[in-house]
Image (tube, grey):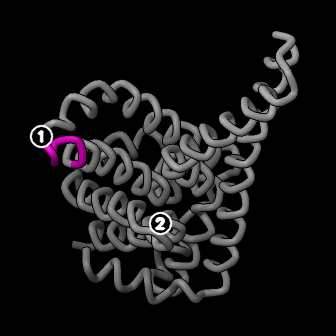
């Protein structure tokens, strides 16, 4: 795991990976900004429909933007990983080209449609499962550490599978992937926990999707040759 992390960090300067980072970061910010604009617009139209004063409209718009900012921070991980699903193939190719050329020669490119599907399923699982667990997160606040522990366990499991599938999709069809999911669960969980931790660190969280996809590539190929 440490080796995969260090190798991934060492390749952050690769021009292909820098390009993916810029594209994925810009799209993530755009989606969150559009979400905020949508909430602001809805608040303004709601105020107009109720016939409230302009001052209340400004207040409602401001509150909507603050809510959007808070939700954007909470949803950043889900949105960022969903976006990475679209561009993950480029990261995996860059890593395979440098470290696993034989595997690269055998791989098949992931279509945009499949990448989007993987990304949307990832975001949907993260949002729905975390919403379902929200009451438990709240109840465990009294323990001091229970909420954080449950969050890391659940999101580590989700994120590890998401990153792993981004790589496996280049080398396996759907039926083969079902068998693959039954193996290497411990390594994928460790990857997911590491990725979840990166998402919690300011600045590093911006690079977490890239680092996670690169680490998943190393773990996938090392696991197949072990």
- Judge whether 164 appears above or below 175 on screen: below
The residue positioned 21% from the left and 72% from the top of the image is: 226
Please name the residue that numbered disc 2 is placed on: 205
Spot occupied by residue 174 in the image (x, y as percentages of width and height): 47, 40
Residue at 35% of width from left, 45% of height from top?
A: 158
State the image coordinates of residue 209 (x, y, percent, origin top left).
50, 63
Of discs 1 and 2, which sits in the foreground?
1
Q: Secondary structure at mark 2?
A: helix
Q: Position of residue 173 (x, y in %)?
A: 49, 46
Reading the image, the residue beneath label 1 is 143
Residues at marks 1 and 2, CA–CA distance in whole angstroms: 26 Å
Q: Quick one: 225 or 119, which is closer to the camera? A: 119
Q: Dot 1, crowdedness within 10 Å: few (<14), some or many (≥20)?
A: few
The total of numbered circles placed on residues is 2
Secondary element at tag 1:
helix
The residue under the point 53% across, 58% down is 170
Q: Residue furthest top?
A: 50
Q: Residue furthest left?
A: 143
Region rendered in magenta? 143-148
């Amino acid at each position: 795991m440490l080796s995969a992390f260090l190798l991934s960090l060492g390749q952050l300067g690769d021009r292909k990976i820098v390009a993916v980072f810029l594209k994925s970061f810009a799209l993530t910010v755009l989606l969150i900004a559009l979400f905020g604009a949508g909430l602001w617009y809805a608040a303004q139209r709601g105020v107009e429909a109720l016939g409230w004063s302009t001052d209340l409209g400004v207040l409602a718009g401001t509150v909507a933007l603050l809510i959007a900012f808070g939700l954007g921070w909470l949803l950043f991980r889900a949105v960022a990983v969903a976006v990475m699903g679209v561009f993950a193939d480029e990261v995996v190719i860059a890593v395979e080209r440098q470290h696993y050329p034989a595997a690269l020669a055998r791989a098949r490119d992931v279509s945009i449609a499949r990448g989007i599907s993987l990304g949307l399923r990832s975001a949907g699982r993260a949002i729905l499962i975390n919403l379902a667990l929200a009451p438990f997160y709240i109840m465990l606040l009294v323990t001091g550490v229970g909420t954080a522990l449950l969050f890391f366990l659940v999101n580590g499991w989700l994120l590890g599978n998401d990153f792993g599938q981004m790589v496996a999709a280049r080398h396996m069809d759907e039926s083969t992937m079902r068998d693959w999911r039954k193996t290497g669960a411990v390594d994928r969980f460790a990857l997911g926990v590491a990725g979840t931790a990166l998402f919690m660190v300011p600045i590093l969280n911006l690079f977490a999707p890239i680092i996670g996809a690169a680490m998943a590539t190393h773990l996938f190929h090392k696991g197949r040759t072990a």
